[in-house]
Image (cartoon, rainbow, N blue to C red):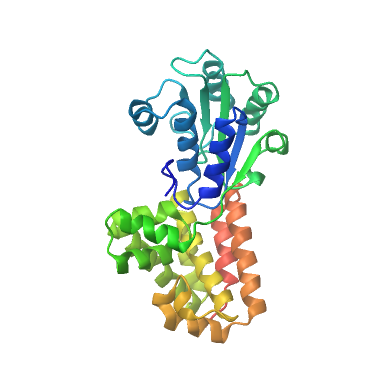
Amino acid sequence: MNNWGVIGHDPVVRRLQAAIERGQVAQSNLIVGPSSVGKTTLAHALARTLLGTDERTRRLVDIGRHPDVLQLQAEKDKESIGIDPAREWLRTLTLAPVEGRYRVGVVGSEFPMTEEAQNAVLKTLEQPPPSIVLVIVAGSVDDLLSTIVSRCQVISLRPAAYGDVCAALIERGAAEERAGRIARLARGRVGWALRAMKDESVLEERDERVVELERMLRAGATERFACAEKLAKKDDAHVRAMLDEWLLFWRDVAAASGAAALANLRNADRSEFLESVRRRTSLAEVRRILELHTRTMRNIERNANVRLSLDVLLLNLPKL
């Protein structure tokens, strides 16, 4: 692991570290990538490095108490960040740094910004004061206005390598066999791997999601409608996690349809089910399902009707 404490993204860290040492750090940064790949960890590590390497600075940033790191938050009971909290955040951000050379403004991916909030942020991106560094975290550049994206240094994070994730888990005390299993299941999602190491229920929930997909593939329309209704009543995080797991399974089916050995796939522990689906589903059908999953997830993220989106997805899955 690099000295930023970021797992699996050494080239990105080296590039950012070199820019900081040259005094050429970008004032507007957009970190994008898949869920749990390490985007927020990198954002906080960048803030720590900009503000100082002493233990006190690192600790204050890590616990969210450093006076020069300002996180844009949604208002209580709101599902998105509106213009009022954005304006207040920007007003505070433009004040002089309290302790260091910079004030670092962080926008997480937990709550999306409304278009009005994004336009308010855009004005600061166009002419940022010299003391400000903005770090925006998002799943994709498509989640933001193109005018914001064009003014940012885009840092794209890819899933971490299996070896990097496995080594990090072993370093944190996981037995080699357990680390290997979790790293394979994580599929490069560092955050997921760390949670699974600490909490056995993460692995249990993953197993339940794969079992539910197997049940749906054998179910008729009535059961599929019932599943969509039940799932639509869950919170957004639960729905995303379920669809993420199903999407990863279908990617394994697509890979198994090629030359990949089943033992090397994420769902190797479900090899019998995986092989059964592979035998009964053509590669063209798997590609259609992958496109359908991706479109469903994108539509839900864009506030489409969740129940209707899930109905369409489940009814278009093959019946085995």
Name the residue at the bottom extreme.
279
Residue that appears at 34% across and 31% down: 59
Q: Would you identify the image quadrant in which residue 28 lies?
A: top right
Q: Report whether 295 appears left or right of 101.
A: right
In front of the other: 304 or 246: 246
* Residue furthest out toward the top: 96
Q: Does residue 112 appear in this view?
A: no
Residue 177 image position (x, y, % from top left): 31, 69
User: Does 203 appear above or below 276?
Assistant: above
Marks counted in the figure total 0
Locate residue 63, reporting x and y percent: 35, 32
Q: Residue at x 43, y 80 (%)?
A: 271
Q: Which residue lies at the image location 29% right of the left edge and 55% below the top edge? A: 199
| Residue 27 to residue 318: above or below | above
Left or right: where 50 falls relative to 211: right
Q: Is residue 100 above or below residue 237?
A: above
Residue appearing at x 56%, y 33% in the figure: 135
Residue 89 against residue 189 in the figure, above or below: above
In depth, the one of 128 and 176 nearer the eye is 176
- The reply to whether residue 29 is in sight is yes
Q: Specify the quadrant of the image occupied by residue 315.
A: bottom right
Q: Position of residue 297 (x, y in %)?
A: 58, 56
Left or right of 251, for residue 45: left
Q: Position of residue 48 (x, y in %)?
A: 44, 31
